[in-house]
Amino acid sequence: MTAGEGHAARMDGVYRGQRHIYDLTRKYYLLGRDRLIDELAPPVGGHVLEIGCGTGRNLIAAARCWPGAHFYGIDISEEMLKTARAAIARAGLNRRVHVAPGDATGFDPQALFRVGGFERIFQSYTLSMIPDWQGAIREAVRHLTPAGALHIVDFGQQDELPIWFRAALFGWLARFHVAPRSLLVEAAREVANDIGGQLAVTRLYRDYAWSLRLQSARAKPLGSR
């Protein structure tokens, strides 16, 4: 079994039962997801990819928020994709939202979706679950269009919260193979430097979560309209 296959099997094991209650329980601590969606601002007719789409919750919300764009999602867990496909169908979004199995560290969007690149890619609380999370950032950037942007939201280091809270949260997350990445900002900055891009970082909710936006070299300067 390869590393990717092993991770897929582990995620299927974690989510085989949890997928049925995932959205109900995660809304209380996966903070910043809707903020990310509000900031995507894809161009009309643009293509948006979520890496680690899970139940499809974010894709559905993003498709409703940005009706002029096309949305795609990949996930390594077939169990989660079962829930995503059903949710997308119930929402009546089959024509605008498409999902497929894929590994965040190596995928071919042309083969999966017949799409060559994406104006927006986002990763919401996935990097803390991916063993090669640095590779996942680089793979995402590789599939951006020349003026595209990668949006990330994930756990921060809780520096402005009580020590006991950080210890309790990290211990609980470890039970689900989740490890907040202390070097997330540094890794993203290195990728931005490598491609001549720009990185903006916002620390949310007293450092509970980190929001990152990495823009390609040909994108408009951060903060411009």
Image (tube, grey):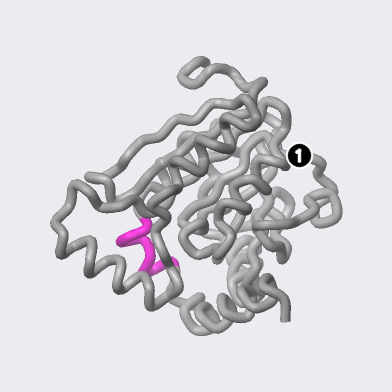
| Residue 49 locus on image (x, y percent) | 65, 47
Q: What residue appears at the point 68 percent right and 70 percent down from the top-left corner?
A: 4
| Residue 78 locus on image (x, y percent) | 66, 74
| Residue 67 locus on image (x, y percent) | 61, 38
In the rendered image, is residue 82 in sight? no
Q: What residue appears at the point 68 percent right and 48 percent down from the top-left corner?
A: 139
User: Residue 26: within the magenta?
Assistant: yes
Q: What residue appears at the point 49 percent right and 21 percent down from the top-left corner?
A: 222
Quarter of the image for residue 181 reads bottom left
| Residue 5 locus on image (x, y percent) | 69, 76
Task: Tell me the kind of residue under disc 1.
Answer: Gly
**Image: magenta residue range:** 23-30
| Nearer to us in this view, 136 or 54 | 136
| Nearer to us in this view, 102 or 192 | 192
Residue indicated by mark 1: 117
Quarter of the image for residue 121 reads top right
Image quadrant occupied by the N terminus: bottom right
Q: What residue appears at the point 14 percent right and 56 percent down from the top-left corner?
A: 162
User: Residue 191: within the magenta?
Assistant: no
Q: For the residue labelled by badge 1, is the local secondary structure a helix, a strand or a loop?
A: loop
Above or below residue 2? Residue 145 is above
Quarter of the image for residue 201 reads top left
